[in-house]
Image (cartoon, grey):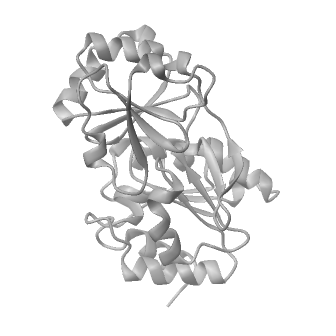
């Protein structure tokens, strides 16, 4: 199984899949390798990429919401799902209110922009198809399941938001900086590894059958656990430090170049 982060990894800086990457991934997929996109976004938001790569067969799945939801591509059925309750986000909401920060909370279908707080930049940053709803924190469903919280602001503002965060708040979440302007708040042990473990188990496999590509904080788990963890040249130093190999950057067909070499593709 080949697991692929999107932004900064499979996608170029202008958010496209290069022809080299497309052709190589289509070839290994045709030859029986499972190709799995791993993203923090919902599947509808990345559907054009799934179609471009032809990942719509009976055995094709996608890891979404940074591991909290595994979706069967061709009928959108859920293989695995793990969420948090509204109560889980109360410490984050209180801190965002105190720090004059924005907050978006996602379930598995839409984004709730929390109206009590500073306006968020997330809707403008988000690329893809998902509904945004403005809602007060008090009006969120108490028993509903939510996938993650998002604080989206200028990078320097997020730096301060993280530095000033009380330890008791930070300990409630697995916090990842998926992009310079986006900080994600997941369940304490949630990352892409959780979804991949569920998917590998579905096929009767384990992490010895996994090759993973990534560049940023939310890829650290899968890069560490994979038999072959591949970091992008443009990736963070922490990712490179735990990877098996470093390939070329995302604008130089890093994914395709490494796969061509590994699978001896001409």
Which residue corresponds to the image point at 36% horizontal and 77% vertical from the top-left? Answer: 18
Residue 44's place in the image compared with 33, above or below, is above
For residue 5, say whether it is visible.
no
Q: Could you say which quadrant of the image residue 149 lies in?
A: top left
Residue in front for this viewpoint, 170 or 95: 95
Q: Position of residue 243 (x, y in %)?
A: 48, 51
Which residue corresponds to the image point at 37% horizontal and 11% vertical from the top-left? Answer: 94
Which residue corresponds to the image point at 58% horizontal and 19% vertical from the top-left? Answer: 142
Q: How many marks?
A: 0
Locate the N terminus and report the quarter of the image it occupies. Answer: bottom right
Residue 75's place in the image compared with 176, above or below, is below
Which residue corresponds to the image point at 70% horizontal and 78% vertical from the top-left? Answer: 32
Q: Position of residue 53 (x, y in %)?
A: 51, 76
Q: Position of residue 198 (x, y in %)?
A: 72, 47
Q: Could you say which quadrant of the image residue 210 lies in?
A: bottom right
Q: Residue furthest bottom?
A: 266
Residue in front for this viewpoint, 87 or 14: 87
For residue 177, say whether it is visible.
yes
Q: Could you say which quadrant of the image residue 177 lies in?
A: top left
């Amino acid at each position: 199984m080949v697991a692929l982060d999107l932004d900064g990894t499979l996608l170029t800086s202008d958010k496209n899949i290069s022809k080299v990457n497309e052709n190589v991934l289509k070839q290994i997929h045709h030859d029986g390798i499972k190709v799995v996109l791993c993203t923090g976004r919902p599947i509808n938001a990345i559907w054009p990429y799934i179609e471009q790569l032809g990942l719509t067969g009976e055995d094709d799945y996608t890891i979404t919401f940074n591991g909290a939801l595994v979706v069967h591509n061709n009928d959108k059925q859920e293989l695995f799902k793990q969420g948090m309750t509204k109560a889980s986000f109360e410490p984050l909401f209180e801190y965002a209110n105190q720090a004059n920060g924005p907050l978006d909370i996602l379930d598995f279908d839409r984004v709730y922009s929390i109206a009590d707080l500073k306006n968020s930049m997330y809707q403008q940053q988000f690329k893809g198809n998902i509904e945004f709803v403005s809602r007060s924190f008090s009006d969120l469903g108490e028993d509903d399941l939510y996938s993650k919280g998002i604080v989206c602001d200028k990078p320097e503002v997020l730096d301060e938001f993280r530095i000033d965060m009380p330890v008791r708040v930070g300990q409630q979440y697995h916090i990842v900086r998926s992009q310079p302007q986006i900080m994600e708040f997941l369940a304490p042990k949630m990352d892409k590894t959780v979804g991949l473990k569920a998917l590998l188990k579905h096929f009767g496999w384990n992490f010895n059958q996994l090759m993973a590509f990534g560049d940023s904080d939310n890829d650290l788990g899968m890069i560490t656990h994979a038999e072959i963890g591949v970091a992008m040249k443009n990736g963070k130093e922490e990712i490179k430090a735990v990877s098996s190999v470093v390939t070329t950057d995302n604008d130089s067909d890093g994914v395709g170049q490494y796969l061509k070499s590994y699978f001896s593709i001409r």
